[in-house]
Amino acid sequence: MPATSAKPDFSAARARIARALDALCDEALPAIGSPVGDAMRYSIRGEGKRLRAVLVMLTYDACGGAGDVAALAAAVEVVHAYSLVHDDLPCMDDDDLRRGRPTVHKAFSVAVATAAGMAMVPLAARAAFEAAERLGLGNAANGEIVRVLLRAAGAGGMIGGQLLDLEGEGRHLSLAQLERVHRCKTGALIEASVEIGARAASAPPAILAALGRYGRCIGLAFQIADDVLDVTATSDELGKTAGKDVAFQKSTYPALLGVQGAIARAEALVEEGCQALASAGVLTPALEATARYIVARRS
Amino acid sequence: MPATSAKPDFSAARARIARALDALCDEALPAIGSPVGDAMRYSIRGEGKRLRAVLVMLTYDACGGAGDVAALAAAVEVVHAYSLVHDDLPCMDDDDLRRGRPTVHKAFSVAVATAAGMAMVPLAARAAFEAAERLGLGNAANGEIVRVLLRAAGAGGMIGGQLLDLEGEGRHLSLAQLERVHRCKTGALIEASVEIGARAASAPPAILAALGRYGRCIGLAFQIADDVLDVTATSDELGKTAGKDVAFQKSTYPALLGVQGAIARAEALVEEGCQALASAGVLTPALEATARYIVARRS
């Protein structure tokens, strides 16, 4: 891997996102009786890479955004947190460990986790709308941002992908079918993060198109890397159970292409995504480093 | 009961709502692979009173709305359908029967029902936004309508109420505690329906306030009537399992006030709500009949 595969330093961005998530919890959740409010806080404040929120911020910067987009980025991160609560449920992937801690339904209960997860989408949508309003974009752009977020969160995006993934267990999927699952399951929200950052900065259509391609490429690369990590990393490194894909007989990129073939595919996608940005003149060092980190990460 | 307690004729409104729900399913769901799309259709197209959607339409009419509000009303109904999928899950009320058919998790699976339920909130929010756009209200009003809907769907509304309800099983709740549960669990969306109809018709603040009071009153009356029906009606009449409150040792209005006391409380709320509308000059015969029907219904 080239030198740029070193982990980029997102600590300043992460600190801003953490503050925005705290503010969102403090503003929106005190009225909610425990334990559902507690479960939402537990999920939202758990440690994480905050990749989606970081992408909102980096894309916003790359497109010349001059305001504080952290609150909008935090709203996107709430949708991601919701998807983790949901995916870990016993009726889904049935996982006990996430981000190095008990999953929400283990720490609380299945009922509380289900309700908390369901409540996080409306919370995120409202938070996104209010954050967009504070950026002064105008109501049409606010509405479009919330729509992009909801589309990613819905049945055509993450939820559809998760179901396609469950249906695929024990079945052999072709590369095209697998790509469809991955593009929905993980790609939809990563692509939305990039689009939301660009829309928040009022990027013109040509830039939006290039960023859309970048988002699709790195979203798919992220899930390929996840598949690779599931077979090459330990549960301790991942903060979640490793080796689950084999246990559940899931079709994965390493199973179809081999580990090296899967890594090569992910790296090619990263190149393609960066090239799209370079051609449109918006390839910042941070967006390039993030794309490379997505493939090179160990957790 | 006075003569106005006879079941009002909502058949024309229901037919329009059914068409709008069909259109919403046809537009939004074909891209979604079964079974999650099938489960959403099964839930959304199930028979129902369509009370929330009817309330959107009647309130819109009462406030002088001149457009076709059926698509917006349908979006509200999707949120209601989602809440039924969610409430029936094994981790929640664990019910096998709803609207005279197997519940969604019985007809499909817990995983599919959970995913379908979660996908219905983003679907409803997007549908509401687009329906409001087609009414030509302007982006600020569109955003406010979606916000009202999401607030009702979230942790401060229906989801919070459902959790408070579960927590209350086997415990004695005071009348004030019970009212809080009911206002969230059922009241939130009924109140939102009334507010959305009024906002769609660009009602002025005084009318919105009166309708807010009407919505709160009939929302609580609806849940009191539900409690009463749970002990006085059969599963066959209800299309869902009767007698569950006693089985789950839930605190209910009949348990606290007796059946007659509970009915009297519900009727007083209906009077209060209608009086608020009369004072503001927006009490239409249809809104009065609906309020009375809410208490007098047998299912």
Image (cartoon, coloured by chain):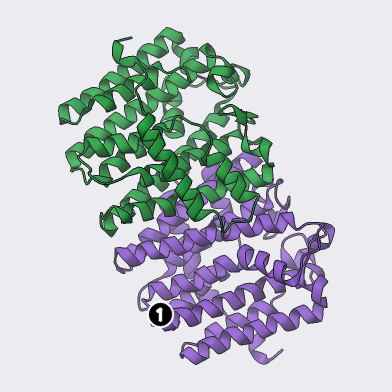
Chain colours: A green, B purple
Image coordinates of residue A193 in percent, x first then y, are 35, 38
Answer yes or no: is residue B12 visible.
Answer: yes
Q: Chain of mark 1?
A: B
Q: Quadrant of residue B172?
A: bottom right
Residue that numbered label 1 is attached to: B205
Tally the numbered discs. 1
Under circle 1, the secondary element is helix
Is A231 above or below relative to B110? Answer: above
Q: Amino acid at mark 1?
A: Pro
The one nearer the camera, B34 or A23, is: A23
Q: Quadrant of residue A235?
A: top right
B36 left or right of A111? left
The one nearer the camera, A226 or A164, is: A226
Query: Dot 1: few (<14), some (14–19), or many (≥20) neighbours within 10 Å?
Result: few
Image coordinates of residue A239 in percent, x first then y, are 56, 24
Is B96 above or below relative to B226? Answer: above
Is B169 above or below relative to A282? Answer: below
